[in-house]
Image: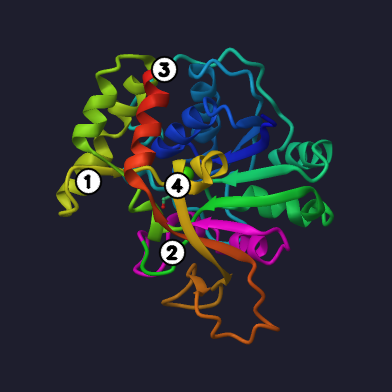
Amino acid sequence: MKKIPVWIDCDTGVDDSMALMIALRLEELEVVGISAVAGNVGLDHTFKNTRDVVALAGSDVKVYPGADKPWIKPYVDASFFHGSDGLGGVILEESKAPVETEHAWDALYKAAKEYNGELKVVAVGPLTNIATAVAKYPDLPQYVKEICIMGGAVVGGNTTPWSEFNIECDPHAAQAVFKSGIHVVMFGLDVTMKAYLTGEEVDELASYDNPAVRLTAKANQIGLAFNESIGRGRIVHMHDSCPVLYLARPELFKGQDANVHVETRGFSSNGKTVTDLYSLFDSKKAEKNSTVMLEIDRDKTIAIVKEIFQKY
Ligand code: RIB
Ligand code: CA
């Protein structure tokens, strides 16, 4: 089977760590490069966390440092949910891999050229690195087959009533990506909130007793408690695993093409992924630049996740 070449850009974080550990075990994917961006926590932590999780997975895929702040907006983190270090307080063995110094956007461009249009990008943090790559290399869109993002929401938000964290953190970069000409497969909260693990399922993962599940079980405790405290129940959402699983198993998801743009000038709408599911905009002006995912087969997804973590 021909593997899909994939670049992962992340702000590791708890759910990013799960997505990385899953991506590095899916036989359908060849992870050719990984980059870190400021998001859940600062770049110093996201870069280290990403390196350490890749090492935990036994992978030698290179990890590159990216942006330490958004394009324009002041940087605001999500450490209340991911812990000050980004992994819920879990201390991992430090990666022994050489520390890459090449910028994420330069390394991504090189990889895109090398894979000559076959490369797919998974972006599960703020889109600062991706947008910077597009701005610096105007021909990048010719070499990226599609970009699968965890970000946005057709309805609602988790950072403001209308915006999701990855988009809200850097709305200008997000808008640049949606306008770049690269087709976006958007995994917004509409579908990622349906990709949850119950506390019992997290406990079952923990029972497999390997380094991957020890990280996942411990790192998710803040999220489990937070969701329970706000009445959602003892659950956590595998937001970032959605785009990863989609590339390997697209049949798990359902969605539709739509025009999406990001509000960057609003007051009570800034960071909103304005999603035209019903083609209300003039189609000449609002081409369908995205595929917006809305449904997931959660049972099949959980079964795949369990199988992957059992084998770690
Ligand atoms: O809103 C959820 C997203 O924001 C996830 O990618 C999480 O890791 C944070 O980056
Ligand atoms: Ca993330």
Q: Which is more N-terminal, label 3 or label 2?
A: 2
Which residue position holds label 3?
311
Mark 4 or 2: in front is: 4
Which residue range is magenta in the image?
158-187
Which residue position holds label 2?
153
Identity, as a three-letter code, of the amino acid under mark 4: Leu
Q: Which is more N-terminal, label 1 or label 4?
A: 1
Which residue position holds label 4?
252
Q: Nearer the viewer, residue 204 or 266?
A: 204
**Mark 1: which secondary structure?**
helix
Mark 2 or 3: in front is: 3
The answer to whether the residues at label 4 and label 1 have Cβ atoms under 8 Å apart is no
Mark 4 or 3: in front is: 4
Taking the spot 76% from the left edge, 57% from the top edge, the residue there is 135
* Residue 302 visible (yes or no): yes
Crowd around label 4: few <14 · some 14–19 · many ≥20 (10 Å): some
Mark 2 or 1: in front is: 2
Q: Which quadrant of the rendered structure holds the C terminus?
A: top left
On the image, the x and y values in percent for residue 157 come to 37, 64
